[in-house]
Image (cartoon, grey):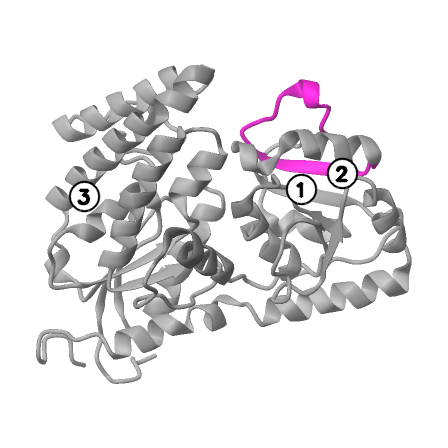
Amino acid sequence: MQPRNGRTRRVLVIGELDGYANSLKPVAIERFLRAHGHEVRLIDTYSLSRASGARDSLRRKLPAPRPRKMLLYAVEAAGKLLTARWGFGRRRLSYYVLLANHRVRRSILTSSLRFDEFDLVICETPHDAGVLTVDTTAETLYDCPTPWADELFFEERLTERQHAELRRREKKIFEKVDHLTFHWESYARYARAQYGLTGRNVAVMNFGCTLAAERAQFDSPPRVVYLGSLGSRFIDLPLLARLARLYPHIDVYGGPAPDPQLGLNYLGYTSPDILSRYQLGLITCTDDPLRREGFSAKHLEYLAAGLPVLVPSWRRHLENLRGSVVYTEQTFRSVIGTLSDAKQWQELSDEAYAQAGRLTWDRTLRPLDSLLENTPGPPGDHAR
């Protein structure tokens, strides 16, 4: 496909391909832009400090033999040592480790990439968003997963003073970039209200999905699936464990492996292909201001398989996520009981699948097409 204005653009996409939700949007953007006739370079920074090699190889566990990358490796090791299990370190020292990580990553990327060779630079991760503050002739787009300072604060990784300072730094990036989007539009509203953004550069470019090749089918009793990362506090694993005790037909996939004492039916890491074996998708999250306004990428994965989605009652803005059913711990079993009726389940499943059809990547990424159409480039440099 040729670009709409006949001009091919060169685009750099920076993201962390961690095998979970963070991998989905950078790859979708690359495919979308290539399909529309643009030249795209995707940089995976997930293992930025590591030696090259297969992801599961021993070599990949070693630091890359370059000074900056060895420094980043040391910062990451210090972060694990000081903040992973030590409560004081997690709350008091995470900020300093994060700043060091941010600065070293920025130094590595700015020294190895020539941003002026591109017409548009897109960053998909807060860990590398500092690169968008460099002086460049390229236009910049920060497609922010979630307001990071607030996420870290509610994860209990910042003091109040550190939170205020990191929010100030993050706001500076938000205001400097040419274009600012979030993985879901409710995060944009949250950031404008809580960070006091001017909003001059804010646009909507929501997360998307790919419709499943095989849709879910009704069965009784309904089997419930949880699929996704299990490594953050906002997931609320204790809530997931309590729900599993209320209803025994819940299977959990993802990583890292949860504490066995939670009693979850944990079945390891898998792909979304298994979703068609289930009847309901499950979301759990903490009840804090950010997550109330928030979004879960797994929500769209569930909808794309035709699964009705069970969502905590405190999560707002479900009007664009039809096929969702809210629950509390007190109503969880009765909600599932209602969906044990084949007719009611099928109606909600059809609603979920139709909603996913309105949120495919080809639809949600259309703002990129318009943005590039209006992005100036060197006269005649990329014309086709």
* Side of 373 where 261 appears, left or right: right
* Side of 129 where 254 appears, left or right: right
Rendered image quadrant of residue 64: top left
Q: How far apart are marks 3 and 2 (CA)?
A: 42 Å
The residue lying toward the viewer, choosing from 314 and 271, is 314
Q: Which label sits on residue 23?
A: none
Rendered image quadrant of residue 32: bottom left
Q: Quadrant where the C terminus lies?
A: bottom left
Residue occupying image coordinates x 48% and y 62%: 185
Q: Is mark 1 on a helix, strand or loop?
A: strand
Q: Quadrant where the N terminus lies?
A: bottom left
Tell me which label, 3 or 1, sits earlier in the chain: 3
Q: What element carries label 2?
A: strand
Residue occupying image coordinates x 64% and y 66%: 319
Q: In this view, does 59 lie above or below 42?
A: above
Question: Residue 12's spot in the image, x, y percent?
Answer: 24, 58
Q: Determine whether label 1 and label 2 are within 8 Å by CB.
A: yes
The residue lying toward the viewer, choosing from 254 and 131, is 131
Question: Residue 34's spot in the image, x, y percent?
Answer: 33, 68
The residue lying toward the viewer, choosing from 84 and 357, is 84
Please give the residue where the numbered disc 2 appears in the rendered image: 250
Q: Which label sits on residue 109?
A: 3
Residue occupying image coordinates x 31% and y 84%: 4
Q: Which label sits on residue 226?
A: 1
| Number of marks | 3
Query: Which residue type does callout 3 highlight?
Result: Leu
* Side of 140 where 270 appears, left or right: right
